[in-house]
Amino acid sequence: MVISLVPKGVAQKGYQFTHLGSTQTCQKCNLLSVCVNSLETGSTYEVIQVREKEHPCLIDNSMMVVCELKQKNDKISVRQQKYLDNVVVTRETIDCVEILCENYDYCVSEKYSKTTKIKILKNLGKINCPLNYQLVLVEGEKITK
């Protein structure tokens, strides 16, 4: 479980988001360590509990709500081959320039920007790639050891 701040308009149990990092304005905030630094860039989180405490955001003067979050498994693309659940593989970067492709975020991720070891938890099926890469979408997690 992670404690962080979520915009009041979306702070509800079950809401999911991918943390994209901070802004220059965030660096000036005294809540930086709770709001931004407690989250891993590129990871997806789900709100599991909303607390009552609110804080103003320096970016747009909106209110942020303290929430308990659960990190979700990542959905990422990998080169197609036979994958078994719970296998650890090395994921090579995928060079893609098709930024309007519906699968772009699965292929190009800051969290998985270089050669990375991942544990594949579940194969989610083939991806239709406009560049003709043979890819599959998997649910997985980054191995940091």
Image: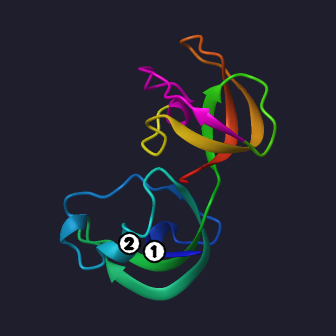
What main secondary structure does the magenta stretch of the protein show?
Answer: loop
> Which residue shows up at 52% across the image and 54% down it?
43
In the rendered image, the vertical position of residue 109 relative to residue 144, given as above or below: above
Task: Check if mark 1's residue and mark 2's residue have beta carbons within 8 Å.
Answer: yes
Give the alpha-carbon distance from disc 1 to disc 2, as whole Å. Answer: 5 Å
Q: Which mark is residue 35?
A: 2
Mark 1 or mark 2: whose residue is earlier in sequence: 1
Q: Position of residue 58 (x, y in %)?
A: 23, 71
In which quarter of the view is residue 33 placed?
bottom left
Magenta residue span: 88-107
Q: Position of residue 141 (x, y in %)?
A: 63, 50
In the rendered image, the vertical position of residue 2 relative to residue 91, given as above or below: below
Q: Which mark is residue 80?
A: none
For label 1, the residue is: 4
Number of callouts? 2
In the rendered image, the vertical position of residue 6 relative to residue 110, given as above or below: below
> Which residue shows up at 49% across the image and 28% down it?
93
In the image: residue 126, left or right of residue 40: right
Q: Quadrant of the C terminus?
A: bottom right
> Which residue shows up at 24% across the image and 79% down it?
30
Residue type at the position of mark 2:
Cys
Residue type at the position of mark 1:
Ser
Residue at disc 2, secondary structure: helix
In the image: residue 87, left or right of residue 16: right
Q: Residues within 10 Å of mark 1 (few under 14, many from 20)?
A: many
Nearer the observer, 114 or 96: 114
Q: Position of residue 136 (x, y in %)?
A: 69, 27
